[in-house]
Image: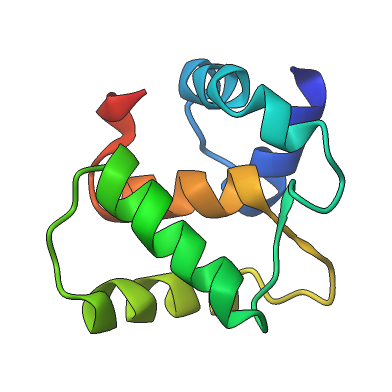
Amino acid sequence: MSDARETVLAYVPDADLDIVDKMAKTYRLVLSNRDASLVSASDPAELKTVRENFLKKKLGLTEDDATLDAAIKEVLAEMKDGKANPRLAVYYKLAAKYGKLDVF
């Protein structure tokens, strides 16, 4: 779990580590695969997956697709540091943005 903590703390220095641990446990299978552990900002299918499976299904958001897509792009732009976009950090930032960290 320490890798998960370090990954999220790199982008959210004040992250709640208990929530990070719960998220890492929830997504442990995804995180174990290098490709799946990253969010590709340039892949429309990947961004749709984040919107449909994480924002809508997991967090229960009901905003329209354009609003959710804009939120994803905003988070990815905040993380643009020349490195890959770690899925766990993207998910944490999105959940925090919508006040949904308590889902975990």
Of 15 and 41, nearer the camera is 41
Q: Can residue 27 be seen in this view?
A: yes
Q: In what quadrant of the picture does the C terminus appear?
A: top left
Residue lying farthest to the front in this orientation? 45
**Residue visible at 83% across and 39% down?**
33
Of 11 and 43, nearer the camera is 43
Res 74 quadrant in image = bottom left
Q: Is residue 31 left or right of residue 87?
A: right
Q: Is residue 58 left or right of residue 25?
A: left
Q: Can residue 5 be seen in this view?
A: no
Q: Position of residue 44 (x, y in %)?
A: 56, 81
Q: In what quadrant of the picture does the N terminus appear?
A: top right
Q: Position of residue 9 (x, y in %)?
A: 66, 40
Q: Where is residue 92 in the image (x, y as percent from the top left)?
A: 48, 44
**Residue visible at 12% across and 59% down?**
62
**Residue visible at 60% across and 17% down?**
25
Q: Position of residue 54 (x, y in %)?
A: 40, 48
Which of the colour schemes (rainbow, by chain, secondary structure, one colour) is used?
A: rainbow
**Numbered label tally:** 0
Res 97 quadrant in image = bottom left
**Residue visible at 59% across and 68% down?**
46
Q: Is residue 61 above or below residue 43?
A: above
